[in-house]
Structures are given as C-alpha cells and as structure tokens.
Amino acid sequence: MKTSDDNFAYSVDKFADLQILRYKVKGFDSLTLKQKELIYYLSEAALHGRDILFDQNGKYNLKIRRMLEAVYIGYEGDRTDAEFHALEVYLKRVWFSSGIHHHYSTDKFLPGFTVDFLLNAVMSLDKSMLPLSEGETVAGLCNKLFPVIFDPEIMPKRVNQADGEDLLLTSASNYYVGVTQQEAENFYSAMKSSEDETPVMYGMNSRLEKKNGEITEIVWKLDGEYGNAISKIVYWLEKAMNVAENSKQKEVIALLIDFYRTGDLKIFDEYSICWLKDTESRVDFVNGFIESYGDPLGLKASWESIVNFKDLEATHRTEVLSSNAQWFEDHSPVSSQFKKSEVKGVSAKVITAAILAGDLYPASAIGINLPNSNWIRSIHGSKSVTIGNLTDAYNKAAKGNGFRDEFVYGEYEKELLDKYADTTGDLHTDLHECLGHGSGKLLPGVDPDALKAYGATIEEARADLFGLYYIPDLKMVELGLTPDSEAYKAEYYSYMMNGLLTQLVRIEPGCCIEESHMRNRQLIAAWALEHGAEDGVVQLVVKDEKTYVVINDYEKLRSLFGQLLAEIQRIKSEGDYETARALVEKYAVKVNTALHSEILERYKALNLAPYKGFINPVYTVVTDDENNITDIKVDYSEGYTEQMLRYSRDYSNL
Ligand code: ZN
C-alpha cells in the first residue's frame, strides 16, 4: 500500500475500521546533536509509559495483550487459517486501542475467532510464555480472561456516559474500584473549598478504591502505583535534563521529575506554569497524566506523551501573515465602516512530532492546547500548537486512496490538486485562523450575540471567505506563501468540491447539516454556485451518472467570494439577524437527497477506513570508539506489528 509522491510509504497497514499511517520527522537531521539527544531521551521516557495506559483502560488489558502476543508469536498451527487471521486482527485492534474497547466509541469489540481456537492455542504453548501470576494455572488464566474477551455482557463499555446509570459501576476503565458514583463525588467534593482560587486538579493522578468499607486514593508515583514504569520515565527524564537547551527547560523537566516522585498536585501546577512559559526552546514535550476523557466524571487523567520541535518554516508562514495583518485589513472588499483601524494577527505555532505515546498513540490529536487547569489558563494562558507533520501525513496518505480519482472532474483539476493542494490547504487554514477571525469590527452598540444560533456559521463563513478572497492575491506570491499566481485554483476547486459534494459523506442519510463549519462551507459554495450561474462561473456537471464540480471562471469566482465576504461582514457588524437566518436556512442546511445518496454510494465503494493512527519512527544512537554519542539516526522501515511487538518486549514495565 505504498502511496506517496516521494517514495515514502505513508500508509502502512489497514484492518477493521482502522488505517495505520507513518509520519515523517521533517527537519530532524538539521537539529543540533544536543537537540537530537534531548529528543532521544524524551522519546525513551515516552515509550516507557506505554503499559500505564493499558492498565488505566481496563484491569485485564495487559494480561490479555500478553496472552494474545504469546499466541501470536508461539502458534505452531496453520498461520494462514481464518481463525489465526482473526486473532491477528483482534490483537492489532487491542494494540491500537490500548485495550479491548474501541478507542473512539469505547464499546468493547468482539473477536472473530472461537473460544475453542483460543483455548487450544493457549494450551499448546509453553507455560513460560504466558502471563501467569504467582500460583496461577493456565486453566485459571483462561477462566479469568476468556469471559472478558468473549462475553458481550462483561465490561461492555470503557466509558459509560448514559444519563441515569451509575457511571462508575458501568464503566470498564480502571479508575475506580468498588466505588459508586455517589461515593466518588462525595469523596472529591469534600476536598474542594470554594475559597480556593487556585485549586489543584483533585484526583487526577490516582485510582479510587474501596477496601474493607474504606475509600482510599492509590496514587500513581515513583514509590506508588505504576512505580516500575515511572522509575524508567524518571531515569530518561534525568538524562534529558542534562542536555536541556536552556535553564528554563531544565526547570520544566526538574519539576516534572519532582511531580513523578511525590505525586504532589501542587508541584504539577508549578510544572504546568513553567512549561507554558517555556516558549523559547526549540524542543518541547508533554509527558504525564493529561486528559480526562477516559473517566466518566472527568477527573482521572490518562497517561500520554508527545515529543516535538518547532517547525520553523511553517511557524514563519503564520508570522509573515500576522505581521502583515493591517495590510490585509485595509485591502479587503469589506465596507470601510466595518474595518478595524488597528488589527493584530495571531501567530500560530506549528510543531513537528518526533514521538507519540500513551493516549496519543497510535491515534493522535493534530493540535494541542494545554494545560487543562482552569485557573492556570485564566491567569497564565495556555500553549496552543498544531502538529504539522501529522496533518501532512494524512494529506499524503489520502492521495493514493482513490478519493480524488472518484470525485475530481478531470485531469486538469487533478493536476492542480496534486501540485498545489497541500500548500494552499495549509495556507487557507492559516489565513482563516491568523487573520480571518480577527478582522472586522462590530458597529457601536451591536450585541456580539445578535446573530444567536446563526452566529457560529456566519463567523466561520467570515473567516473562510477572508482566506478565499486573499489566496489568489499577488501579495501571497510576493510574501513567498504561494509558488505562483495559479496555485489558488487548487484551493478554489477543493473548497467548492467539498462544500457542494464531498463533505456530505459525513452526513447520515436523511439528515441535514448541523455542524457550523460544515454549514459555512455549504453556504459559501452553494451561494457562489447560484450567483455565478448566469455567467457559468461554477457548474455541477453529470458525467456517466456521476456528479462533478466544474469551475469555468476562477477570477469571477474570486469576485463572488469578495462580494459575499462584504455582505457577511455587514451582517456581523450590524447584527442583522434576519438576513443571517435567511442566508443560512436557504444555502447551508438542506441537503439534496438524490445527490446525497449518490455521494454516499460512491464513497462507500472506495472502502476507506474511518479511523487513522500513526506508528513512530525508530531512533538509533550512533557512537564512536570511546562510546561518545556522535549522532542519532531516524529510520522509518519498521512495520505496525513489528513496532508493537518490540514495544511489548522492550518497554514492558508493569
Ligand atoms: Zn474558525
């Protein structure tokens, strides 16, 4: 499944509803040796936490993973057999989810092999390969784990959010043991004081257990729960501290180590503040108990890590835009009374991921906004970044998947997209975020919420149109943001195709469009289609019973976008609710049923995996005769199964 323009295999594997991608650590070779070393040590610290998440996601997950891995490695029967293949798929899913529940829906997934198959396979193995506890027999192990694997009634959901049920007793995650929801809520509300203006995130780094009628917190720290994994993490963090780029970064790492040693949440807050103030270092990382989506009460944080470094080129792009913010404001087609006399652009930081771990692996976010503590955010702010090389890998992998061949009209359009779409897609996002939302002003006395339920769609349309209007501008070529004056056509084509056709793949049959970004895209595309109809600017063309977008006049399309931008800004500035409502209801909400089912059918035939995740590169230390580190090499040849088995072998700490 090699799909790329530069012989790099972005797509690695596909099974169940998952696709595994690989990302490129662009720019790693140009880092200094010290920075590479720092990344290497932080990567080791990241990988050593792997087992923590498996255990947090469910108390049998580690044993199940190890039993399945033993079968996978030691099975001497027919490895081409359908049951063995089903076991392989199931194991790959367990690796992906760090447990037996779907990473996204949190529902338990069931194996495609039989109890007999697994029983025979386990029984035929040498006992030493199996994850037996002291005194446990093989039959005992099977009796304990098989119902958890096969019975749909046992631990059916990792995170239950159903209103009216005891969310803790019905959730399979391992954050509460024998504690009812009421007991946990009482336990934590007793800790909080309304006078405390800087409250720690109570319960964030512990399991709550009831034993002999008493409720206690089992804290995750060096000499406590997960201590074996945490001691390895601390070992590598200490090495990282010695090659830190500056004293601020050194302090960040020292505070994190202190937190892992003590489990003291006050120290975690100190660490968070120090971390968010470290904006000068090129290398950055997250390593710890961070997000609480896995706890129905939103208290307990799952373990995750990412190591990254600033993408100077992409960050430069957003800095160029924001430093020219006034020029863009002054030259926009918006009526001058709605313009800001003084406008500030936002400069977004773009980072390159070097390693993903825990709850960011293999499925990862493409942006990070931390810390999560409310009082820290309101007093000290937060660090917000986008992960450029992951987005890039998504784009590159999508190239060979048949999507463009199916929905793009002709060779001319396909070539446009191949040549420019990655660049112009990123640029449109930057224009939207760095300039679009910040442009324009409300007239005095206008209520910012005047557009009510239509406000979000109008606001997104305003930001999108600002970007669409400026992408063709020669200023873009002048600033070095597009390669030439043709590039914008790629964004225009993909925007219109998405807004009129392909975004419908995310809408269930019979439903209308509700999400405000999707509404905004259809609003703009459908409005431009209608208003350019007389001149044939954009058309929907049917060829071999398939509908396509054709753009006949790109320049006129730009002036239509400019016209709509001026009108949308007027609506916003004046708080013109009636016109906002009329526009959104007419263009943005309704879906043509026949066209919708055509698009859904064509999409389904492509057989694309809805969920994606990433495997990591492999870093290897190069030393000289005296054992001094002379370089760190990055390698991309490892496969998904290889990587997972290696991690299970080398980073198995619990
Ligand atoms: Zn937006």
Image: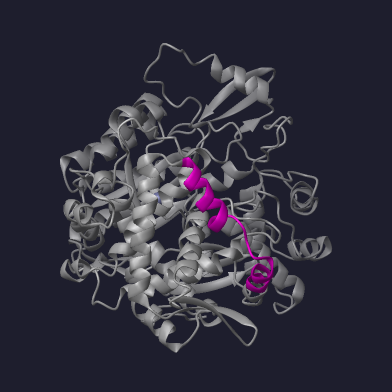
Q: Nearer the viewer, residue 505 or 597?
A: 597
Q: In this rendering, would 69 be left or right of 468?
A: right
Q: Is residue 175 magenta?
A: no
Residue 429, percent across and down? Answer: 35, 59
Which residue is painted at 37% across and 81% down in the image? Answer: 416
The number of numbered discs placed on residues in the rendered structure image is 0
Residue 559 rendering spot, x and y as whole percentages: 33, 67
Q: What color scheme is it?
A: one colour
Residue 598 magenta-highlighted: yes
Q: Residue at x 22, y 42 (%)?
A: 249
The magenta span reads: 577-600
At x 66% / y 37%, what residue is drawn?
A: 161
Q: Quadrant of residue 8?
A: bottom left
Look at the picture and state if 309 lies above or below 541.
above
Q: Is residue 192 above or below residue 457?
A: above
Q: Residue furthest right?
A: 116
Reply above or below: 305 against 267: below
Depth order, front residue of 571/344: 571
- The location of residue 475, given as percent across then percent down, is 19, 66
Judge left or right: residue 424 versus residue 133. Answer: left
Q: Quadrant of residue 116?
A: bottom right
Residue 456, percent from left and from top: 46, 45
Q: Residue at x 30, y 76 (%)?
A: 487
Dominant secondary structure of the residues highlighted in magenta in the image: helix
Residue 41 is at least partly visible in this image:
no
Residue 517 in sight in this render: yes
Q: Along the horizontal axis of the image, is 639 left or right of 438? A: right
Is residue 509 toward the left or the right of residue 540 in the image?
A: right
